[in-house]
Amino acid sequence: MSKKLPRPLRVLIIDDDKSFVEELQRDANPFRIVLDHAMSLEEAVEIVDERGEKTFAGIILDVICLKKKNQMVPDESFLARAKEVFDRKVPNLPKVILTAEPGQFKTLKPLYEGTLSVYLKGGDDQDRMFAFFCKESEKLEHVRMASQYPDVFEVFEKQFLERNEEQELVACLKLMDSSDPVVIADNLARLRRLQEAIYLALYKKDPRYLPPGAGVGGGSLFKHVIRHLKVMHLIEHGKIIEVASGLIHSIGSDHGTHVPSKPPLYEPTRYTVQMATSAILDLLLWFKELMEADVASGDGASTS
């Protein structure tokens, strides 16, 4: 069996030349980079606001481009404004300048030394730019986690869960070795929220996935979910998903979401978090299989 490849990197490019971006995408393909194209700074900001910083592994800036969507003539002040906006909104994302003019390249390279890398459109310099994004992406937590757990993170790539849930999982994976009691409690609460998001996503797909009253109209979300899923023949991994789900809910509720009335005899440790995190990863894989089967068949929950 071949090793599963990490999901492609997404890079936002702002350029008013649509045909050039289409050509550039062909050059980006060997690097497993997908270009999300914005024609103006205004459109690029809307894309980042809608999808979130952690969707992207970098930003490519043109030198002279449109600032507003309704502009007809490229603005010479675009680059300075774009750098200012994205340094503030997404300070951790690597950003580069891509120019077609050799003269601009020679002028801008020393001007932005140490702040922005400058590349020349066409030829080997574009390849160096894509290689730069690949290398810099290793510093981004969300990219590292998605590369480490590519099968799990497909649930976000396929939009079975939202970006907020992806950020919750990234935070938990990043912090699961912490022995700080506050961080431990936060992580356990985070895992319980992820479990809730999984079941609510199933419910939105088809209400029959959850029993009547589970999480709807103030009812308890988890009280009868596992028993219901077993009756619906939706737990195909035997005891694994049943036990994993109960573990996350019980530990996450008792030591994360709710403050116990008196200190427990045994306090949760980082190993507790690691145990529950492994359980949520299994639950996410099960959830992905269920959603994929449902999408493939075009039907709702199976009762057979």
Image (cartoon, rainbow, N blue to C red):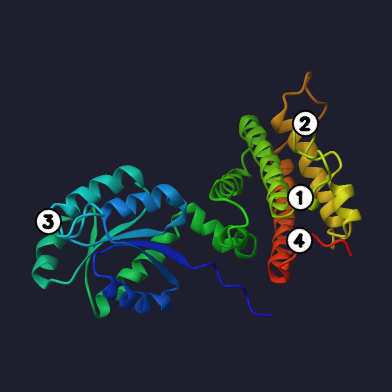
Q: Which dot, 1 or 3, sits closer to the camera?
A: 1
SS of the residue at dot 1?
helix
SS of the residue at dot 2?
helix
- Quadrant where the image shows the C terminus: bottom right
The amino acid type found where label 4 is placed reads: Gly
Residue 171 quadrant: top right
Please report contact status of discs 1 and 3: CB closer than 8 Å, yes or no.
no
Q: CA distance from mark 2 to mark 3?
A: 58 Å
Q: CA distance from mark 3 to mark 4?
A: 53 Å
Mark 1 or mark 3: whose residue is earlier in sequence:
3
| Foreground of the two, 147 or 86 | 86
Residue of label 4: 300
Residue 207, disc = 1
Mark 2 or mark 3: whose residue is earlier in sequence:
3
Q: Is residue 223 above or below residue 283?
A: above
Q: Horizontal placement of 37 versus 243: left or right?
A: left
Q: CA distance from mark 1 to mark 3?
A: 53 Å
The amino acid type found where label 3 is placed reads: Glu
